[in-house]
Each structure stands twice: as C-alpha cells, then as structure tokens.
Amino acid sequence: MAATPLDEHRDSHPDADVDEGRIDDLPDFSDFATHTWHAHDDKMSEVGFVTIARRLPALVGQAFRMAWEANPRDTVATIALNLLGGVFTAFGLLATTGVLEALFAAGPTPERVRAALPSLLLVGAAAVARSLFQAGAGWTQARLEPQVLRIAEKRLYGLTSQVELIRFDDSDFHDALQRVRTRGLSSADSVVGSAVDVLTALLSLVAAAGVLGVLHPVLLPLLVVAVLPDAWATVRGAKMQYATMLSLLPTYRRKWIVSELLADRETAAEVRSFTMRDFLLRVYDMVARLEQNVMMRLARRQTLTRLAGQSLGGVGTVLVYVALGLLLAAGSVPLAIAGTAVLAIRSGQGSLSNLLYAVNRLYESGLYFTDFIDFCAENEATTVVRGTGRPPDHFDRITVEDVTFTYPGKDTPALSGVSIHIDRGEVIALVGENGSGKTTLSKILAGLYAPAGGQVRWDDTDLAGVDPHLLRGRIAVIAQDHTRWPLTARHNITMGLEKGEEAVRNAAGVAGADEVIAELPRGYQTLLDRRFTDGQELSGGQWQRIAVARGFYRDAPFLICDEPTAALDARAEHALFERVRAHSDGRTVLLITHRLASVRHADRIYVLDHGKVVEQGTHEELITSNGIYADLYNLQARAYS
C-alpha cells in the first residue's frame, strides 16, 4: 500500500505535536481519496526543460484557440500589441548604442551631449511607445481572461447538465469532475494569461538576443550563461510544489469535508445537538496540521533551491563581465557597444526570468487545463444521444418489457427482467422494501436512466429512439428528495416553464401549496432561502407541497409520484392523495410509496423484490394471495391497531 501524507509525516517527524492516541479514534476518510487524485504523479516525475519545451507549443495552441473562441478581436489585439512592444524594446536598445557612442566620443562635453540628443530622443520615443503598447496589451489581456473563463464554465456546466444521469453514480466520474471544478476550470483563464505572458517575455528576450547578435556574435552565448541557473531553479521549484500539491490532494479533500460539516447550514443543528464541535475540530486540526507541516517542508526545500540557483546565477554574471572586459581589452568591441551589451544582457536576464516564471505557470496550469480539456472531450465523446425522434404527445399504454439495469461498479443488477404495463388513466403503484428497485424503475420510466436491456414503449414507439429531453417534457415527477431551490416560491413551482399566472395558482391550489404561500410575506415573490436578505424558510411538509405543485403545474400526461407524502402529516397525506385522484382524471399516475394504505385504490399494484416483479394485482387480489404485499400491509395495519 502506498504511503499516505500522514505516514510520511509520522516517519519524518516522530516528535511532531500530534496526539497519536487521538488519531486512532478519528474517522478514516480514505474512501474519499481515490487513485484518480494522483493522476499526474508520473507526469511530474518527467518534468524538465525538454518536457516543458516539447509541450509548450501545444499548450500555447490550446490557450489561443480558446482565446479565439472567446473573442477573436481581443486575441489579435493582444498578440499584435505585444509584438509591437517587443519591436520597440529592440529599437530602444539599438538607439542606446548611438547615445553611448556620442557620449564616449572625443571632444568637449557640450558637443558630445548635443550629438547624443537625436539618439536620446529615439530612446525616449521607443520607451514611450513600448510602454503604450504594453499597457494596451495588458488591457486587452485583462479583457480576454474573464471571457475565456466564461466560455470554459459554459462548456463544463453545459456538459455536466447534459451527461447521462447514471454518470453521477460513478465514483470515477465524481473524482474527475471535482478535480476539474477545483483547479481545471480556474486554470482556463490562467493558461491564456500565462500564454500571453510567455509570448510577451519571449518577444522581449528575442529583442535583447537580437541586439546582442547585431552588436557582436560572441555576446549572445554570454546571455545564456547568465540566465541558465535561474532557469534550473525555477523549474525545480515548480516540480517540488506541484508534486507536493498532488500528494496532499486527499488531505485537501478531507479538510474540505470536515470544514463543510463545521460551517454548513444543513449540519449546524446536529453539530450542536450532539456536541460534535470538539470532535470535528480535532479532526480538522489533525488534517490542517498535517498540511501545514508538509507545506513548511516544501518552503524550506524551495528556498534552498532558489539560493542554489541565485548563487550559480551570480557566478554566471561574473563570467559575463569578465568576458566583456577581455573583449574590451582585446579591442574586439568598442566601449559604447560593450555598454549597450550590458544593458541588453540585463534586459535579457529580466525577460528570461519573466519567461521562465510564465512558462512555469503555463506548464503547471496547463496540466490542470489538460484535465479540463480531456474531461470535456471524453464526456462529450461518450455522451450518448439515445434518440432523436419525437415522442408521442399521448399514449394508450406504456409497456416495460424485460428491462434490466445495473449501477456502475455493482455486480448485482438493480432490475432484472422487469415487465409491467400502464394504461392511460390508470393509477399504478410500485411497492416493495428498500432496495427492491422501485425508484430505479421510476427513473427509467421518467427517461432519466436508459435500460441496459429490454424495452420501454409508449404504444408502438420504442423510447430508445426518442429524444430523452423531449420525452421528459411529457412527464412530471414528484420526488421525495426534491430540491429546495434558492428561488422565489413562484419559480420553485414553474421551474423555468412559463404557462401563465392562472396555471401557477391552480397547481398550488391542487397541491395545497396555496395555503403555504398565503402565509409568506411577499406571497409568490418570496425568496425561499433564509441565507439571503428577506429570505424565508419552509418546513419539510411545506416544501413537500411546493414540490407537489411542481408536478401538477407541468400538466403532463404521465405523473410519477415517488414517496410524495414522506414529509406530510396524516391529514395532509390523506388530502394530497384525494387531490391526486381528483386531478388524475385523464392522466396516468405511477405511485411509489411505503405507506400501503395509500395504494389501496390503485388500479394495479406491482410488488418488487430484489429487482424483480414478484406480485401484481389489485389490493384485494394481493391480500388474498397472502404474499409479500399482504405481509407488509398487515404489519403496517397492526401498527395502527
């Protein structure tokens, strides 16, 4: 088994201030730290000059393709302005030679100053132009980055809201998605910004190198000698930081989980009721202390690396000046050219330092950005379009024939050879113990899951060939685990579908939600989230009525009710089922519930057990057969006796 950061911490810090006896009592979050969080370990082990140089063109290309998609005009302007800035950098250095030649010439000082003035004006003009172009490039780059981030966010969230629902039951998908959301997405604009910075620094470096090459061919290698140590130190430090970050990813995730428990509104009550504060703080402190110690060791190692690079860089700088002195002594270069060379080398050092920093950022951000690109490409390629046909507006019979379904990572199928039928206008009930497959079957009927085998048909139309998005428009779902949207009461009912105010009030009235909304300070315009100013909170039962109103508002020919009364009291439950029966005139209702008294009047009841239909019939028929349904019903009946 691979060593964890905690193991490494114990081995390297046996006397560290961590209570080992308490650690054994703390929860193990290793289940949340899967191998996908270490996907770049091999990549980072190969990081070096050659690796970076090989990947750099591809990363720059990816960045500018996304920038072009975001805004072609700003992309062209950014590149052009940076290019012009580099041109005027070179022009200013060459003009400096004229200034120095005039100043170092023989003759009275006033005459030398006057002779230098034209070149000096050119140097000033070049500096002003360079500053203006660089400022313009900075402005267009600052405009470009938020546009790139918007494009990236739109692509990711457009994809996550489109992929098959079953992907969210896959732990590998969750890990990849979290990695992309936490770093990959935020790296999109960073990659573009770093690519532009690489271009800017590279142009400045080329300008300095070009000037040195024009002045004297021997001067160009001196630039390499002066900057090579800094390049090594920068890449080495980046490798350390990235590898350390990867090793701490499981720790970051554990820390985030515990911080959510300590600060989330949903857990706040139980943290206090069960006096969990001290326990959770111990967990958090242990994980945070581990992260702190690892980061402190990283800081020490990076400091030593920088010191080594700077020391070697100092030696290189000395060699540069010694070489220049020898060239002057030998008469190979005039004093003015040597002075310009010193300025060009210093400019080149600064440009290369900026280039290395930008390349480092680009490479590191590029790894995360590659995660984003790969995740999107993989899921876009595997997003299955189940069908493009138009579903029927109505049906006479829904037929489920020999349907099978297995969740990702599971060996046992959730459904195995299930066959049922639902006729138009019927109220059909699915009952069974937890894990029997009721909700899975309802999600297949709702078009949320695609069966692995078998068929679901509306009359003669096989739903495998139907556009699932259009199909869902023909179906209304009232779920037990409904979402409490931080929206107004009205939008919590309409869910983005506008059918007029009368339809909203009718749906609320049928569900009994009108009584809830009447008590809100702003009625239908009340924001249902207490985390916001003037927001209101509802009880579980009140939320349940809002969720029921959603289903009725959709006014679809097929209504699926999955435990719709779980949060309601007995009176409200009875009233709701009466409304469902009254409102279902001409509509088809699929009812899933554990409260069997509510399904007595269903036209037909299907009993599921371990993913199979084991009984079917009316309430009276199933009671007479004395099977699973009769046992469950009698158990509940005796509880009320």
Image (spheres, rainbow, N blue to C red):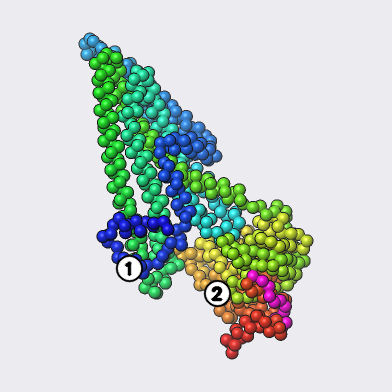
Residue count near mark 2 (Cα–Cα under 10 Å), binned few <14, some 14–19, many ≥20: some
Q: Which residues are magenta?
A: 611-621
Element assignment for label 2: loop
Of residues 239 and 165, the one nearer the viewer is 239
Image quadrant in which the C terminus is located:
bottom right
As drawn, the residue found furthest toward the bottom would be: 641
Of residues 449 and 269, the one nearer the viewer is 449
Q: Which residue is mark 2?
A: 567
Judged left or right of residue 337, residue 249 is right
The location of residue 92, given as percent across then percent down, is 36, 22
Distance of label 2 from label 1 (alpha carbons): 39 Å
As drawn, the residue found furthest toward the top would be: 107
Where residue 74 is drawn, which disc sits there? none
As drawn, the residue found furthest toward the front would be: 1
Judged left or right of residue 367, residue 432 is right
Element assignment for label 1: helix
| CB under 8 Å between discs 2 and 1 | no
Residue 270, visible in the rendered structure:
yes
Image quadrant in which the N terminus is located:
bottom left
Quarter holding residue 283: bottom left
The location of residue 421, given as percent across then percent down, is 73, 69
Quarter holding residue 620: bottom right
Judged left or right of residue 327, residue 417 is right
Residue occupying the point 66% across, 83% down: 630
Please say whether residue 616 is one of the residues in the magenta stretch: yes
Q: Which residue is mark 1?
A: 22
The location of residue 20, given as percent across then percent down, is 31, 65
